[in-house]
Image (spheres, helix red, strand yellow):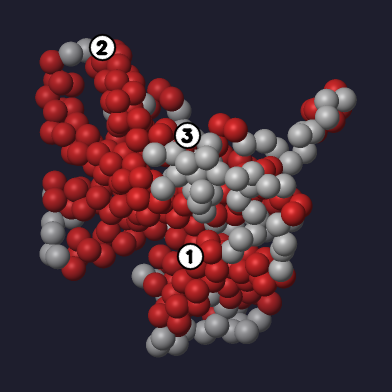
């Protein structure tokens, strides 16, 4: 059940510099993860430090979970879109060896090797390389197989010259690809976690000696992706759930919504080709869009309930630019 929380003014909540410190250290830690030379325990050490820092961000009472700062708290808790790709790249790869800019892809191996060796250890060039990798969570521009946060990161990255415009293509795909649930998640919806999830699930596929293009491998990819989505949505929404929505209900809602997508995509995959063989392409797409609308109309109940439970619909901006121009007082 939803509880009615107290609503004190954010200005009355004391803030210590220690409460803000984890939010400052987190982006620095992501960059510094790429900085030292490869050594045996780099990945485990990075994971331990990152877990401590991420826990500090989640447990920190800043920004207060009250009033107009709730939206800011939720935004900061969504840092996982940068954390997860960095974890996968450092744990599953040796960045110095495995990653290079796509613009270098036409060079022969000797030229690529010379360019990589040209980035000296403990140099500003290597530090800058880490910044660029962190600022491209989808790996665009590299050989790596909430819209507002994306646009803010895009504007900052391009504006500071960290990334080029070509490294930030549109976050969402075409709605015309949404005639299957797989099309919704794989082509239309944002691709923040696609590359890191595939990195981990490919490891499990190889570890279990599962044929790469088999139905079982496909199921492993789906399950891993939606389990990851469940975890990080619980983490981010949980940061603003305290006093508003029980954590157990949040975990249940997110688990049901995301894991049922695995079932839907798997069932859809067994019938899609058969339906496509008996109807015309145009009819197939129309039927597909109807199917997708019905599917999400039913399954989104748990997702919407979780966000409604934390009262997201009641959030207000700390300051409204348009309201200020129109002379409307801010709440």
Label placed on residue 308: 3
Q: State the residue position of label 2.
A: 283
Q: Quadrant of the C terminus?
A: top right
Total marks placed: 3
Q: Residue at x 72, y 47 (%)?
A: 9
Secondary element at tag 3: helix
What residue is pinned by disc 1?
86
Instruction: Tell me which label, 3 or 1, sits earlier in the chain.
Output: 1
Whether residue 77 appears in this view of the structure is yes
Residue 107 placement (x, y as % from top left): 50, 64
Residue 182: assigned label: none
Judge left or right: residue 170 versus residue 84. right
* Closer-to-camera residue (93/251): 251
Q: Quadrant of the N terminus?
A: top left
Q: Nearer the viewer, mark 2 or mark 3?
A: 3
> Can you give x and y, in whole percent of width and height, for residue 280 in the image?
22, 12
In the picture, measured across the screen, residue 264 lies left or right of residue 73, that is left
- Residue 66 is situated, as x and y percent measured from the top left of the image, at 63, 47
**Measured along the vertical axis of the image, is residue 128 above or below residue 304?**
below
Residue 115 visible in this rendered orientation of the protein: no
């Amino acid at each position: 059940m939803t509880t009615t929380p107290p609503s004190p003014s954010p200005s009355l909540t004391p803030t210590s510099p220690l409460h803000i410190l984890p939010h400052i250290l987190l982006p620095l830690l992501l960059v510094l993860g790429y900085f030292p030379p490869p050594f045996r325990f780099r990945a485990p050490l990075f994971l331990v430090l990152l877990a401590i820092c991420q826990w500090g961000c989640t447990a920190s009472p800043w920004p207060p979970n009250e009033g107009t700062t709730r939206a800011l708290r939720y935004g900061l808790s969504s840092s996982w879109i940068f954390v997860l790709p960095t974890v996968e790249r450092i744990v599953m790869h040796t960045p110095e060896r495995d990653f290079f800019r796509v613009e270098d892809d036409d060079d022969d191996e000797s030229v690529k090797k010379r360019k990589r060796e040209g980035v000296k250890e403990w140099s500003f060039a290597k530090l800058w390389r880490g910044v660029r990798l962190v600022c491209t969570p989808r790996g665009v521009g590299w050989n790596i197989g909430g819209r507002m946060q994306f646009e803010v990161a895009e504007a900052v990255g391009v504006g500071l010259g960290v990334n080029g415009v070509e490294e930030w293509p549109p976050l969402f795909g075409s709605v015309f690809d949404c005639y299957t649930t797989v099309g919704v998640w794989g082509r239309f919806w944002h691709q923040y976690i696609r590359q890191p999830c595939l990195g981990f699930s490919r490891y499990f596929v190889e570890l279990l000696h599962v044929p790469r293009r088999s139905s079982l491998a496909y199921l492993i990819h789906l399950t891993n992706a939606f389990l990851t989505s469940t975890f990080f949505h619980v983490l981010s929404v949980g940061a603003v759930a305290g006093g508003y929505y029980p954590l157990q209900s949040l975990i249940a809602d997110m688990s049901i919504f995301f894991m049922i997508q695995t079932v839907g995509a798997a069932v859809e995959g067994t019938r899609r080709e058969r339906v496509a063989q008996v109807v015309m392409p145009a009819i197939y797409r129309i039927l597909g869009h109807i199917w997708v609308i019905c599917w999400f109309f039913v399954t989104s109940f748990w997702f919407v309930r979780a966000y409604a439970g934390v009262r997201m619909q009641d959030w207000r901006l700390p300051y409204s630019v348009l309201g200020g121009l129109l002379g409307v007082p801010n709440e």
